[in-house]
Image: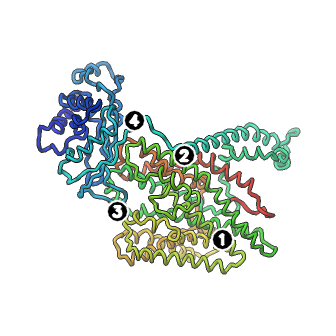
């Protein structure tokens, strides 16, 4: 304690006492504000003068307040613009409840601290100031606006935002804080009062959230109670008929026919947590599924969450340059996260093709072709897909808008991507699945670009698959043209923009190279081809050992090309164009080889790993996990009181925690929103004359 008081007194004497001329340029911001108290003729000005005088006398409460305020931090040149101080310590300066320590220690502390001078004579509040600097010597990674400094100030609660804005503009004009130390000028952006009692959330989003969540909770509760206490008991009672010492099994369908004819009961069971949980965690594979894809989907989602853990921490990362250094040294780690999205595209194309052709093969159309019926079939598929994706999507969108509106008022950190504003303006783009056709900065839920692409690819693939039942070679020609055209377009656009795949260029040209459907279509098309091959091979391909080795060598060569040729980012524009043209297609071919090898009875360690039954429940939750994980990651970061310092091992451990939390939340979202509406869709959508359509 003696040492702490000595340090505080020494620092205050040097930094804000004005005694040593050479340190004038490093005056503490909170003292700089107090030093301008004379320009205010208000309660705020009087209390700031009291604070300033108390500092001159080294009064303990003023030192606590000063110590709670932010000041210049080491690491400024590498991007540490977070001078936050301590919000909790600032608010605790008014707490008169003594610490629960031994009485002897309390008495000992009174020799160094006067209890009468330990607490401020007026209420204190924590303010956050955002201002821009133009120092040319700070290193930037050029991903966001990295010139914004966040400063925390513990000051009298009587001060208003206008009071502080007036003082800070005067301080920045006079260059009181830094003088010419970093050759910087400052421009005030905003002063935020985190204790403002007038925080109002968007009423429309709030109503939607309350109605949506309220309805889901109510229906879930009623459905679960009905299922557990009525339906399940009736099911058990009718399942067996005991006679003597034996048991005679009775068909559920026959016994429950009259009981289950109630549509209200069926609707309620759709919302039952008991039944839906059993369906999620069942490890039984449906007929016609591809076991290996479950493992691919889960492991790919883990890679995406790990990547999101880094990307969505940039709002509060205080050593961005070191992060860039790390990713340059281990570029293939981040590339795996980016390429995991292509695995989802390939899996989606493969599954929908495989399942469609399985049904088409099982239920052959014997009558003449009816073009009107084919058109209706197309719209039914699209509507089912829309209902499959949209309820959970819109719920997360509303949660995102509400959360960001709240954090914009309560978080210490400056929010660069203001989702609460873009969602309020452009939510209709998301519900139409066209948000990927607009700028990233104008996108609600910027990670939702994948859903728009997937829906658009699904529509195209459905049209081609239906066309293939009438004009097979025409569908093959169109599909081939799309694949070749996408490859050529990727290379051409890369050459036109003289693209070199550095991190800043990837971010600035994301609208062109990353989210555009014509740039991301290749893996989906490879997935369609893979599904068709599996149907034709009937999952029973027999290859000689040399052919199996050749197949794995092809997969490995594709991986090497995609992962290791991207390691050197500073290559010629022509070489980059060739890489951009081929990398996603070759990566998709690599994954397709693995799927075909594992699905055609060529057992091996890869097949045993990816076909592990434990992946099946987790695979069913990947859609909701993808939707919700960025909300969780950013919410935890924005709620934090301190900035994030990137270190690999702690960030990796945090990523594992985010994976677990994301899947727990995705389970809740799935049983309350996703599965009930899927089951309702199965109940109410009836196909014309054909019972063979199932949920995709």
Q: Mark 1 and mark 3 in contact (Cβ < 8 Å)?
A: no
N-terminal of the two: label 4 or label 1? Answer: 4
Q: Residues within 10 Å of mark 2 (few under 14, many from 20)?
A: many
Of tags 3 and 1, which is closer to the observer? 1
Give how far apart the Cα atoms at labels 4 and 3 are.
43 Å
N-terminal of the two: label 3 or label 1? Answer: 3
Give how far apart the Cα atoms at labels 3 and 1 are.
44 Å
| Residue 189 as seen in the image, left or right of residue 465 | left
In the picture as drawn, the residue positioned furthest to the right comes out as 244
Q: Which residue is mark 4?
A: 195
Q: Mark 3 and mark 4 in contact (Cβ < 8 Å)?
A: no
N-terminal of the two: label 4 or label 2? Answer: 4
Of tags 4 and 3, which is closer to the observer? 4
N-terminal of the two: label 4 or label 3? Answer: 4
Image quarter of residue 86: top left
- Look at the picture and state if 460 lies above or below 255: below
Looking at the rendered structure, which numbered label has been put on residue 463?
A: 1
Give how far apart the Cα atoms at labels 3 and 2 are.
43 Å
Q: Secondary structure at mark 2?
A: helix
């Amino acid at each position: 304690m003696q040492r702490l008081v000595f340090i505080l007194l020494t620092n205050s004497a040097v930094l804000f006492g004005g005694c040593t001329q050479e340190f004038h340029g490093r005056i503490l911001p909170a003292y700089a504000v107090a030093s301008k108290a004379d320009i205010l003729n208000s309660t705020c000005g009087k209390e700031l003068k009291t604070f300033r005088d108390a500092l001159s006398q080294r009064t303990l409460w003023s030192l606590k307040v000063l110590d709670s305020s932010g000041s210049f931090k080491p690491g400024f040149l590498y991007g540490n613009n977070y001078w936050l101080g301590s919000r909790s310590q600032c608010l605790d300066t008014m707490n008169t409840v003594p610490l629960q320590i031994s009485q002897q220690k309390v008495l000992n502390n009174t020799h160094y601290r006067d209890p009468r001078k330990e607490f401020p004579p007026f209420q204190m509040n924590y303010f956050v100031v955002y201002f821009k600097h133009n120092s040319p010597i700070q290193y930037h990674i050029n991903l966001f606006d990295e010139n914004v400094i966040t400063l925390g100030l513990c000051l009298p609660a009587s001060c208003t935002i206008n009071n502080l804005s007036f003082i800070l503009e005067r301080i920045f004009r006079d260059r009181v804080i830094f003088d010419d130390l970093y050759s910087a000028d400052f421009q005030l952006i905003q002063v935020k009062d985190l204790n403002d009692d007038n925080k109002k959330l968007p009423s429309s989003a709030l109503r939607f959230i309350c109605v949506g969540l309220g309805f889901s909770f109510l229906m879930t509760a009623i459905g679960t109670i009905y299922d557990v206490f009525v339906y399940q008991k009736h099911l058990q009672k009718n399942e067996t008929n005991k006679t003597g010492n034996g048991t005679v099994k009775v068909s559920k369908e026959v016994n429950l026919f009259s009981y289950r004819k109630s549509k209200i009961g069926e609707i309620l069971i759709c919302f039952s947590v008991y039944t839906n949980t059993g369906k999620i965690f069942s490890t039984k594979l449906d007929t016609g599924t591809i076991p290996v894809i479950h493992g691919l989907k889960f492991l790919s989602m883990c890679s995406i969450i790990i990547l999101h853990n880094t990307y969505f921490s940039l709002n509060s990362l205080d050593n961005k340059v070191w992060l860039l250094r790390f990713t340059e040294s281990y570029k293939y780690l981040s590339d795996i996260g980016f390429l995991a999205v292509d695995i989802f595209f390939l899996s989606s194309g493969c599954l929908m093709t495989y399942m469609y052709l399985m049904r088409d093969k099982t239920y052959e159309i014997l009558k003449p072709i009816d073009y009107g019926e084919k058109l209706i079939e197309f719209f039914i598929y699209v509507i089912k897909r829309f209902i499959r994706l949209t309820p959970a999507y819109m719920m997360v969108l509303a949660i995102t808008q509400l959360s960001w509106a709240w954090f914009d008022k309560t978080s210490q950190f400056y929010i660069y991507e203001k989702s609460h504003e873009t969602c309020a303006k452009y939510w209709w783009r998301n519900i139409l699945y066209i948000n990927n056709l607009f700028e990233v900065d104008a996108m609600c839920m910027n990670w939702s670009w994948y859903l728009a692409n997937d829906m658009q690819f699904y529509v195209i693939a459905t049209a081609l698959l239906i066309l293939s039942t009438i004009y097979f070679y025409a569908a093959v020609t169109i599909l081939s043209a799309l694949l070749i055209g996408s490859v050529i377009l990727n290379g051409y656009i890369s050459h036109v923009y003289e693209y070199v795949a550095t991190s800043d260029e990837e971010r600035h040209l994301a609208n062109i190279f990353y989210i555009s459907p014509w740039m991301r279509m290749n893996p989906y098309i490879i997935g369609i081809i893979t599904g068709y091959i599996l149907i034709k091979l009937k999952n029973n391909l027999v290859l000689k050992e040399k052919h199996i080795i050749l197949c794995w060598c092809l997969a490995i060569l594709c991986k090497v090309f995609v992962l290791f040729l991207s390691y050197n980012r500073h290559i010629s524009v022509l070489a980059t164009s060739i890489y951009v043209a081929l990398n996603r297609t070759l990566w998709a071919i690599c994954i397709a080889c693995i799927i075909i090898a594992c699905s055609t009875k060529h057992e091996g360690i890869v097949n045993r790993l990816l076909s592990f039954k434990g992946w099946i429940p987790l695979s069913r939750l990947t859609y909701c996990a993808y939707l919700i994980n960025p909300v969780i990651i950013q919410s935890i970061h924005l709620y934090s009181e301190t900035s994030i310092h990137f270190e690999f091992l702690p960030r990796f451990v945090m990523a594992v925690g985010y994976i677990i939390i994301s899947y727990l939340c995705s389970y809740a979202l799935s049983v309350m929103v996703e599965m009930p509406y899927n089951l309702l869709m199965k109940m109410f959508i009836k196909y014309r004359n054909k019972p063979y359509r199932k949920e995709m």
